[in-house]
Amino acid sequence: MEDKSEHVSVLLEETIEALSVKPDGVYCDATAGKRGGFAKKILEKLATGMVVGLDADPEAVESLKADIGGDRRARIYRANFRDMRELWEEEGLPGLDGVVMDLGLSTEQLADPRRGFSFSSDGPLNMKYWADGPGPTAADIVNEAAEEELTEMFFRWGERHARRIARGICDARRSGRIETTGRLAEVARKSAPPARGGRDASTLVFLALRAEANRELEAVEKGVRAAVDLMNPGGVLCVITYQSAEDGLVKRLTRKMARGCRCDEERESCVCGEGTAGIELVNKKVIVPSKEEIARNRRARSAKLRIVRKLTKEPQ
Ligand SMILES: C[S@@+](CC[C@H](N)C(=O)[O-])C[C@H]1O[C@@H](n2cnc3c(N)ncnc32)[C@H](O)[C@@H]1O
């Protein structure tokens, strides 16, 4: 029986197949998490090669170090993948044959009330992958952002009642700071009608705040560009997303990089004629989990995998 409190890797087989791990290759699991599901699978296939595991969350990194840090083929770092380029330079790490980015948060992070990611349990409104790291917490954003900023933020992540919820938050904070997940969920639920499909009214508000507190879209764009730069020709990058805003970004960005030109990123193909593609799209159609995987692991239901291959050594 599957333990629902433990993170189960999503699209693991499809991703490992796409990487086609070489025994002497160098790979990066850029979101290794506490359990390092992808890093461990890569390790199984390595002989003299190396896997570099990164995670922004120090608690996850400590657990992973205790688990596989003793393996001479594994190097584990607390690092945000947006800073991969700097890390590679500082540590003198070798060029990569493959990179995995499995975005978002793990089951363990979501379930831990101390982290403040979930509206289902009460805890401090933190929501940062590195809880004590630099930058504002979700509570700082909720209490200090202007009503218009909150509205825009909630809209960006798909909340139809963004305006009403932002106004509700601003009214509520006049009688004291909103410091807990329970209080924020209560305010969101009071401000908007129940969401469709039995979803909690605060679901997208929590998602938007987590993304904002961690500057996730910016990190994904920087991380994808850095990963491509750091890969050897033929290297493969696999990105798994769980939200349409993230998937849309990865889709537009990789299409643009595959054309290597000046055209508007919404365009399907190049019209400026200046394309110097550095990558090719391996799957034009997004890969999604099988029905069997979704039945085994509900968290997989929104996952999407995009794969690209590096063609040249030139930076994008
Ligand atoms: C879905 S979980 C990864 C689970 C892991 N791939 C597995 O299968 O065991 C996502 C992980 O990415 C980390 N993370 C999120 N954004 C990050 C970033 N910008 N840089 C590094 N790690 C990040 C989170 O802390 C979390 O541990």
Image (spheres, grey):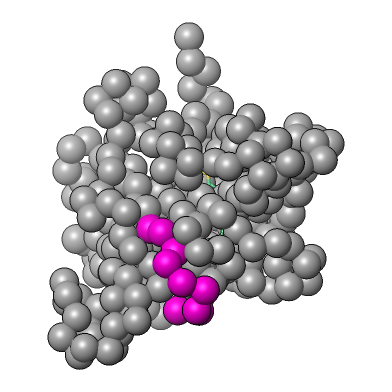
Instruction: Kindly indicate the quadrant of the structure image that contains residue 230.
Output: bottom right
Frontmost residue, 276 versus 171: 276
Residue furthest top in the image: 1
In this view, the residue in front, 309 or 202, is 309
Q: Is residue 238 visible?
A: yes
Give the residue displayed 55% in from the left and 63% down from the top.
Answer: 231
Q: Main secondary structure of the magenta part?
A: loop
Q: Residue at x 44, y 64 (%)?
A: 310
User: Is 176 on the left-hand or right-hand side of 120?
Assistant: right
Query: From the viewer's perspective, is residue 246 above or below residue 118?
Result: below
Report if residue 188 is visible in the image. no
Q: Which residues are magenta?
A: 308-316
Is residue 244 highlighted in magenta?
no
Viewport quadrant of the C terminus: bottom left
Q: Position of residue 148 (x, y in %)?
A: 32, 80
Q: Please name whichever residue, 233 or 259, is drawn nearer the observer in this view of the structure.
A: 233
The residue sitting at 38% across, 26% down in the picture is 297
Q: Is residue 309 magenta?
A: yes
Q: Position of residue 26 (x, y in %)?
A: 64, 51
Residue 313 lies, in percent from the top left, at: 52, 74
* Rendered residue at 49%/22% (across/down): 4
Residue 46, image x, y percentages: 66, 37
How many numbered markers are drawn?
0
